[in-house]
Amino acid sequence: MKDDTRIVHAGRHPENFRGAVNTPVYRTSTVISQNMDEWDRKHREQASTYEPDLFYGRYGTPTSKALQEAMAELEGGFKAFVYPSGVSACVTAILAFAGQGDHVLVPDSVYGPVRRISGTMFKRFGIEVEFYDPGIGSGIEARMRPQTRVVYTEAPGSMTFEMQDIPAIAAVAHRHGAVVVMDNTWATPLLYRAFDHGVDVSVHAATKYVTGHSDAMLGVATTTEACYERLKAATLDLGQVASPDDCYLALRGLRTLGVRLRQQGGAAIRVAEWLETRPEVTQVMSPALPGDPGHAIWKRDFLGASGLFAFALKPEFAGSRRTFIDALKLFALGGSWGGYESLVMPIDPPRTVTQYAYPGAGVRLHVGLEDVDDLIADLDRAFATVAS
């Protein structure tokens, strides 16, 4: 089946809920067994890969399991787990495979909270994190050690949109016995087939495109069968559990993911192309543009673009970044992205082994579902304010 069909049907079982087209919200912690035989059966099932029944709320409910099933199917993975945020999914995916004395490789363009945790919590746990150039490709061979357990990837980077050659990185990592974890939030399962390119665990801030309406905090991690038991154990041991209400909102948003991505991705490319023509702009950071350094990898491995990208003002306009952002009316100043609304924020990403070229000049845009001509007009007015 094609993606649009799978999105509608993945994880849905109306026959189990008296014909209800949407999986109901199960708000429960305690689940009662009728007798010891039922208790023993449910207890055994939680230790297996077959988890059909309610046992205890922390182990999942029909609501959360419907979302897990849908995400695993769309990603082409074995099983998925849900988390209370994207950060918790990222962190759990690393802690499932790394511990005291282990070495983890993380791209220098990594999502900010993962960078922060790498220098705080992971350091206290005795995990050594080494940052690497996201464009390293197969050159990551030189960074591998006998104690390297995880190679973390993110494509494109969520602030500056560097592309990574995931297949090349994965081939080296697997040759050294390391697990490849990828943050696939930007592309979603529809625009990048992580498991087809060598990824072992694909994580998402489902707060973003999966939910799609800026009304829930949620994370998802999907895994191969080989990595399933380790990820499951870490998820349960860390007490990671997502609200059934948030899972329901994610399931509702998931059904329109395809049409939203087509609309927002197409609009974002139009806005990015328009920005390339502006005399105030020195660089548009979007792998979907032919002039972008990562375009060749994007064209080879990705099936489309989402609505998130960035640009940098020329040095003579960098001092007007605040004025530019404050002048926008349709692009609201706010964190996150992936919802229906357009957003803007300044970016000054920290770097360890690479150099960010546009300090004080970077602007990230998320293109929502507004009319693209109105969005371009909003940007045009903001540039006019800067000029005046």
Image (cartoon, rainbow, N blue to C red):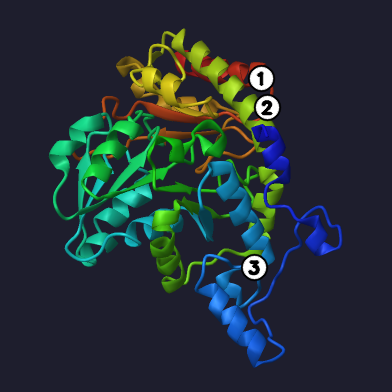
Disc 2 secondary structure class: loop
Kindly identify the amino acid type of the residue bearing the numbered disc 3: Pro
Give the foreground label among 2 and 1. 2
Q: Position of residue 125 (x, y in %)?
A: 24, 67
Q: Amino acid at mark 2?
A: Glu
Q: Is residue 38 visible?
A: yes
**21, 167: nearer the viewer:** 167
Q: Residue at x 67, y 29 (%)?
A: 369
Q: Quadrant of residue 161?
A: top left
Which mark, by number, is residue 370? 2
Work out how far the residue at label 2 is from the one at label 1, CA to CA, in angstroms: 7 Å
Local crowd at mark 3 within 10 Å, few (<14), some, or many (≥20)?
few
Can residue 355 be seen in the rendering of this structure? no
The spot of residue 184 in percent (x, y) is 46, 40
Q: Which residue is painted at 35% across and 26% down in the image?
A: 361
Label 1 crowd (10 A; few <14 / some 14-19 / many >=20): few
Viewer-proximal residue among 7 and 313: 7
Q: Residue 197 falls in which quadrant of the image?
A: top left
- From the top left corner, tell me how far across and down residue 108 is, in percent: 26, 39
Residue denoted by label 3: 52
CB under 8 Å between discs 2 and 1: yes
Q: Residue at x 41, y 26 (%)?
A: 321
